[in-house]
């Protein structure tokens, strides 16, 4: 649940920035994914624009719909999906990193003749080129890693 | 739009996938006409070794071939951390390409000139 995030209640400052967030850390291993999530929520609340959240390297595991944490723990993947639903913020994965690590969407599953796909709702397979394209235009890149 | 000065800093040896993925990032940024430089420190120094037989035996991609193509992408500034080299008892003679040595005092100066620093 993104309970504390309300876009309508955003305080918009004049000096807002176009932010690009990159996440290269696996979920649950450490605090990086939580910090990235809370940073993204707060940045939007403060009126900043998030151009996209780019999941690279082991960060692509944040998009695995096959992840099932214990019920009394936070569900990091579901939390990102809800974040996308509530904010329409683009959650983009590097396709090469994702496919190598077994994170695959329906289209790629068909292409590689896989039995199923596991890209969680709200994520999309993008590319390094799209990331660099956004990077050129961004005011700040904020990277979260292990 | 003015090109951004981007430095990709690689901290892992070639046996780590991160080494290849950091290079992918650097090459893509260079293909977008950004001013890209590479820096190797910590175990990242091992990527520079001429002898890449270990990676062949592991079935991994050799990075040397990509290093040779860096200038074709417009990446001409390659740095290596002097302290990391010394700690591993290596020298620039062991490397497959020429690098600019970075001493501790140089880091601060260099960082001030950059727009974006990406650590892998």
Image: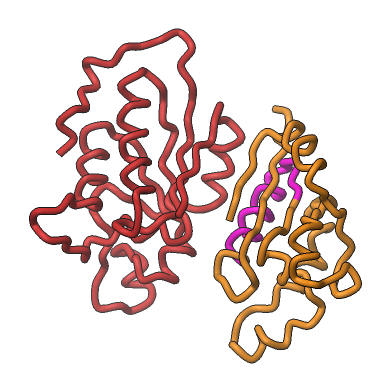
Chain colours: A red, B orange
Residue A59 appears in view: yes
Given the current orientation, which residue lies at the most extreme top position?
A14
Q: Height in image: A101 above or below A33?
A: below
**Which residue sits at x=49%, y=64%?**
A96
Look at 63% across and 60% down and name the residue there: B11
Can you say whether A8 is above or below B70 in the image? Answer: above
A60 sits left or right of B44 in the view: left
A122, B98: nearer the viewer: B98
x and y percent of residue A74 in the render? 17, 50
Residue drawn where x is 32% and y is 72% of the image: A110
Residue A4 on the magenta span: no
State the residue at coordinates (29%, 34%): A88
Q: Please state which of residues B9 and A128 is positioned toward the viewer in this rendering.
A: B9
Q: Who is closer to the viewer here, B13 or A87?
A: B13
Measuring from the top left, give residue B58's x and y in whole percent: 59, 88
Q: Main secondary structure of the magenta part?
A: helix
Magenta extent: B20-37
Residue farthest to the bottom?
Answer: B57
Asked whether, in this view, residue A74 is left or right of residue B68, the answer is left
**At which x and y percent is residue B101?**
86, 54
Q: Which of the 4 image quarters holds residue A21? A: top left
Dividing the picture into quarters, in which one does residue A44 lie? Answer: top left
Any part of residue A126 in sight: no
Q: Which quadrant of the rendered structure holds the N terminus of chain B?
A: top right
In percent of width and height, residue A79 lies at 21, 45
Please tell me how many numbered marks the rendered image carries. 0
Which quarter of the rendered picture does the C terminus of chain B lie within?
bottom right
């Amino acid at each position: 649940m993104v309970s504390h995030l309300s876009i309508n209640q955003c305080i918009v400052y004049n000096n807002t920035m176009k932010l690009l967030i990159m996440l290269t850390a696996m979920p649950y291993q450490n605090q990086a994914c939580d910090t990235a999530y809370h940073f993204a929520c707060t940045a939007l609340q403060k009126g900043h624009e998030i151009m996209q959240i780019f999941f690279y390297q082991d960060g692509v595991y944040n998009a695995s719909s096959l992840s099932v944490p214990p019920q009394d723990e936070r569900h990091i993947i579901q939390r990102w999906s809800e974040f996308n639903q509530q904010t329409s913020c683009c959650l983009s994965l590097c396709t090469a990193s994702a496919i190598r690590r077994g994170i695959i969407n329906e289209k790629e599953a068909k292409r590689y003749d896989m039995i199923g796909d596991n890209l969680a709702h709200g994520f999309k397979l993008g590319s390094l080129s799209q990331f660099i394209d956004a990077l050129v235009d961004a005011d700040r890149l904020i990277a979260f890693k292990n | 739009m003015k090109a951004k000065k981007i430095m990709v800093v690689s901290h892992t040896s070639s046996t780590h996938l991160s080494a290849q993925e950091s290079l992918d990032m650097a090459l893509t940024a260079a293909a977008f006409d950004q001013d890209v430089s590479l820096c190797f420190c910590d175990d990242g120094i091992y990527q520079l070794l001429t002898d890449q037989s270990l990676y062949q035996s592991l079935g991994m991609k050799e990075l040397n071939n990509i290093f040779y193509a860096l200038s074709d992408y417009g990446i001409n500034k390659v740095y290596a951390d002097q302290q990391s080299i010394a700690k591993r008892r290596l020298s620039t003679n062991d490397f497959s390409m020429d690098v600019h040595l970075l001493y501790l005092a140089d880091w601060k100066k260099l960082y001030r000139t950059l727009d974006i620093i990406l650590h892998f």
